[in-house]
Structure formats: structure tokens, C-alpha cells
Amino acid sequence: MKKAALFFTLLFFLFFAKTASAADKSNDELYQELLQNYRRYQGLVEPFNIQRSRHLTYQSVATQADFLDAAKNLASAEVEAIISYTSFIRTY
């Protein structure tokens, strides 16, 4: 229980620092950051689908590891894009 509370406390400060730094950026900078993160996300969708298809076809440990790595990268890019979107929307 203590580890979970510590984790969420650290997570709160991590996101708080990110939103505080977002206030220093202009609308154009936030929009460019949003576009960059969204393009990164879009670029990772196809590799994710390829790795998923390979894993479903071959069902091996190696393909599962590649699939999980692609899923992790896609989820990370999606979260970054969502954070950029909310930072951009908050400026309006």
C-alpha cells in the first residue's frame, strides 16, 4: 500500500511539473509539439500491427517479445500525444 501511495505521489509531481512547464510555451509551440507527438504515434501504429500479426501467426516467445515491445512503444507515444493535446487545449 505504501509503495502504491509513493508511486502515485511521484506520478502526480511528474505530471504537475510537465503541466507547469507547458504554461511557459506559446500556442504555436504547443501545437507543433502536438503534431510531432501525433505523427510519432501514427508512425508506430503500422509496426505494432505488423508485430501483432507476426505474433498471432508464429506464436513464439521471440515474436511475443517483439509484439510487447511494439505495444509498449505505441502506448507510450499515445500517452505523450494525449498529454500534448491536453496542454494545447488548456491554452484556449
Image (spheres, grey):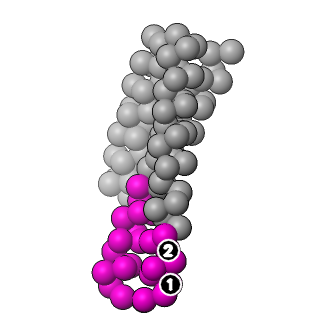
Residue 17, percent from left and from top: 40, 25
Residue 3, percent from left and from top: 32, 54
Closer to the camera in the image, 24 or 27: 27
**Quadrant of the rendered image containing residue 9:** top left
Q: Is residue 68 magenta?
A: yes
Q: Kindly check if marks 2 and 1 are in contact, taking CB atoms under 8 A apart as contact.
A: yes
Q: Residue at x 44, y 50 (%)?
A: 76
Residue 10, percent from left and from top: 35, 39
Mark identifier at residue 56: 1
Question: Are there few (<14), some (14-19), or many (20+) residues within 10 Å of tag 1?
Answer: few
Residue type, label 1? Leu
Local secondary structure at mark 1:
helix
Mark identifier at residue 77: none
Closer to the camera in the image, 31 or 54: 54
Q: Residue at x 41, y 55 (%)?
A: 73
Span shown in magenta: 50-73
Q: CA distance from mark 2 to mark 1?
A: 6 Å
Image vertical order of residue 10 relative to residue 24, above or below: below
Q: Mark 2 sits on what residue? A: 52
Local secondary structure at mark 2:
helix
